[in-house]
Image (cartoon, rainbow, N blue to C red):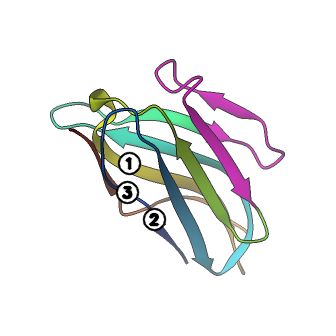
Amino acid sequence: QAQLVESGGGLVQPGGSLRLSCQASGSIATINDMAWYRQAPGKERELVAGISRSGNTNYSESAKGRFTISRDNAKKTVYLQMNSLKPEDTAVYYCEMMIMEIPSFRLRDYWGQGTQVTVSS
């Protein structure tokens, strides 16, 4: 079993920045892909950015040029640096990790508890 703990959300003015973090702990052999999703009220959850174990990244069109995803494999942590935030970025942000567990070495999909990001003046 593994657990993901997110931090870094909050209230920010338009044009501001936030950095989200998500750290995994527990019985972990390795972590493959990591990603950030978000869900705004009344909308479906959507992919914001993803990063492979080797560091290859992909972004939604709305995130390109403003958000940066990164990871620290030693710390079992994924980050999302969000700049030039807009009111439409307001949502609950969730991290996701594909974790290979110990001792089964089974690959499982884990989600964080979500952190609220509100962009408002």
Q: Is residue 77 left or right of residue 18?
A: right
Of discs 2 and 3, which sits in the foreground?
Answer: 3
Secondary element at tag 3:
loop
Badge number at residue 93: 1
Q: Disc 3 versus disc 1: distance between alpha carbons?
A: 8 Å
Does the image show residue 29? yes
Residue that protrudes farthest toward the left in the picture: 42
Question: Is residue 114 rendered magenta in the image?
Answer: no
Q: Is residue 75 above or below residue 56?
A: below
Q: Residues within 10 Å of mark 3 (few under 14, many from 20)?
A: some
Of discs 3 and 1, which sits in the foreground?
Answer: 3
Cβ atoms at labels 1 and 2 below 8 Å apart: yes
Q: Disc 1 versus disc 2: distance between alpha carbons?
A: 9 Å
Q: Is residue 19 left or right of residue 94?
A: right
Q: Which residue is rendered at x = 59% and y = 71% of the image?
A: 24
Q: Quadrant of residue 86?
A: top left
Query: 39 or 87: which is nearer to us?
Result: 87
Q: Which residue is rendered at x = 65% and y = 29% of the image?
A: 58
Q: Is residue 56 above or below residue 92?
A: above
Residue marked by disc 2: 6
Q: Is residue 37 left or right of residue 91?
A: right
- Label whose residue precedes the other's in the sequence (1 or 2): 2
The boundaries of the magenta stretch are: 50-72
- Label whose residue precedes the other's in the sequence (3 or 1): 3
Q: Which residue is rendered at x = 47% and y = 33% of the image?
A: 47
Q: Looking at the picture, which amino acid does disc 3 mark? A: Gly
Q: Position of residue 105 (x, y in %)?
A: 73, 69
Query: 41 or 13: which is nearer to us?
Result: 13
Q: Looking at the picture, which amino acid does disc 1 mark? A: Tyr
Residue marked by disc 3: 9
Q: Position of residue 66 (x, y in %)?
A: 54, 29
